[in-house]
Each structure stands twice: as C-alpha cells, then as structure tokens.
Amino acid sequence: MTNIVSISDARAKLPDLINKVGKHLDRVVITVNGHPKATLISSEELESLEETTEVSAIPNIKRDLKKSRKQIKEGKFITLSELK
C-alpha cells in the first residue's frame, strides 16, 4: 500500500513510517509543496527490486528462461541429488 505524506509530516512521524514500511512492506511517497519527491521503501523491497533489475539486464534472459521451462516440462533436467 502506498501512503502519501508531506515532508513535514514525514519528519514528525519518521520512526512510525519506518516501522510501517519495514513491517508491512508499504511505501511512503514524501511530497514537497504537494509534489512527490522521494519514496520510502523497506530495505527488503529495495533488494528485491535491485535483483529483478539485475536479472532483467542479462542478455537473452527471456529466451533462456523460455528454453529452460520447455526443458523442464519435457523432463530434460537432472536433480541436485544426481549431481552429487
């Protein structure tokens, strides 16, 4: 859930906002003069976004994932225990 908060309210409520963001994975958009300027998100959500961006930047990732899914459906894979 995204909440919109003015910068003055954010200053006054920062500890509560941080707890809410961390506990419920909410987002808080902080405004200055009514315009969005920053967004407070949990470190967990930031890490997830960074990982998604990193994976998405891999050349041909969509093609490779499609190929991998097809191989799994066809039973063309080995299990972890078979690697040992």
Image (cartoon, rainbow, N blue to C red):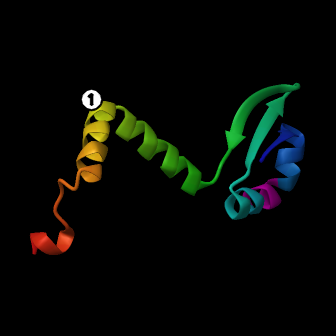
Q: Is residue 34 above or below residue 65?
A: above
Residue drawn at 42 percent across, 46 percent down = 51
Residue drawn at 68 percent across, 61 percent down = 22
Q: Secondary structure at mark 1?
A: loop
Give 39 or 53, whichever is nearer the viewer. Answer: 53
Residue 43 is situated, as x and y percent measured from the top left of the image, at 57, 54
Q: Amino acid at mark 1?
A: Asn
Residue 70 is situated, as x and y percent measured from the top left of the image, at 28, 43
Q: Which residue is tagged 1? A: 60
Give 37 or 62, whichever is nearer the viewer. Answer: 62
Residue 82 as seen in the image, left or right of residue 44 = left
Residue drawn at 82 percent across, 32 percent down = 31
Which residues are drawn in magenta? 14-18
Q: Is residue 32 above or below residue 40?
A: above
Residue 15 is situated, as x and y percent measured from the top left of the image, at 78, 60
Q: Is residue 44 above or below residue 80?
A: above
Residue drawn at 37 percent across, 39 percent down = 54
Give 5 or 78, whichever is nearer the viewer. Answer: 78
Location of residue 42 (image quadrant):
bottom right
Confirm whether residue 58 shows in the render.
no
Whether the magenta-drawn stretch holds residue 13 is answered as no
Residue 75 as seen in the image, left or right of residue 47 = left
Quarter of the image with the C terminus is bottom left
Residue 72 as seen in the image, left or right of residue 43 = left
Residue 59 is situated, as x and y percent measured from the top left of the image, at 26, 29
Q: Residue furthest front?
A: 74
Q: Residues within 10 Å of mark 1 (few under 14, many from 20)?
A: few
